[in-house]
Amino acid sequence: MAHLKRIRKLDDRMSMVLILTREHPDPPAFPEHIRLPPPYVTPVPKSAALMSTSLKLKTSLWPTIYAPRKKFEPEPWTKGKIRWACDAMRQVVKLPIAAYVPVPYDEEIKTATRMSDPISAHDTRKSASHPLRHSIINLVRAVGELRASSTSSAAPSSLDHDPDALSEPHTHVITPQPSSESQPVRNGAHYLLASLTLFTTHEPCIMCSMALLHSRVKEVFYLIPMAKTGGCGSLTCVPRLEGVNHRYAGSVWKHAGAGHMSEWVKESGLIVDEACDA
């Protein structure tokens, strides 16, 4: 219980954490000469708050320590998180050039982002006859459309009906905040990909890398580096440039059969011109 503050003040009352009920399920009895209210059992957060949004939610149960992770601090990967990432990459390789954002593995981030379904998009430059409709640009815009529709009405996104739709994303439910809240919106709360992980087939180009930076994505995993156009480490590394106001991690996905990687990529239909802006 080190993540819990020992005392909670509520109006003119003060409560104190005494004991963990997993070991002692029944509240202890005070001696008769101690004039204090009887102890009671109450639910408390299981862990420290990693984000300001979760801090507010957890503190509503009991005052909790705020312990955000440092930028680029390595996070422990459990077997469950590895399976989550592998499942996401299996989804993204179903199309030649595609991007995919899964539901966050961490329950705290899932609650903070209000994301309950994954979303995906693919490259539509040829089908839409538009040079800027890269898979990542399509995905970022799809998230924006869905956020806008979720706050205005429960109607499906116009992306599903517009003949000029950017992509065919999964249904993505983002629960709107109650309109009755009078508190000011926290700065940065509406960045489209804040705290989310993106998986993509090819290394994002410079334009897409900058779009991800402005969307405040947490990290990007890509399968195929693009030596001539990549913006996450090949041609340049956008999130590492001086003067940018956000940084995110970019990593190349290592296939289990690294020796047969090129053959697998070819068989999967993921080969594109190395000069292509993915």
Image (cartoon, rainbow, N blue to C red):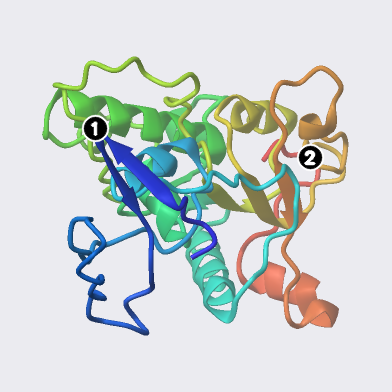
- Is 144 above or below relative to 261? above
**In the image, is 261 to the left or to the right of 270?**
right
User: Which residue type carries mark 1?
Assistant: Asp
- What residue appears at the point 48 percent right and 65 percent down from the top-left corner? 1
Please tell me how crowded label 2 is: few (under 14), some (14-19), or many (20+) other residues with Cα within 10 Å: many
Q: Is 123 left or right of 273, judged from the image as shown?
A: left
Q: Which mark is residue 230?
A: 2
Q: 247 or 170, which lies in front?
A: 247
CA neighbours of label 1 inside 10 A, class few (<14), some (14 to 19), many (20+): few
The answer to whether any part of residue 165 appears in the image is yes
Q: Determine the image quadrant of residue 16.
A: bottom left
Residue sitting at x 56%, y 72%: 86
Q: Which residue is mark 1?
A: 12
The picture places residue 4, in percent across and down from the top left corner, at 46, 55
Residue at coordinates 60% horizontally, 76% vertically from top-left?
78
- Residue 245 at x, y percent in the picture: 71, 21
Q: How many marks?
A: 2
Query: 137 above or below 261?
Result: above
**Depth check: 20 or 244 in front?**
20
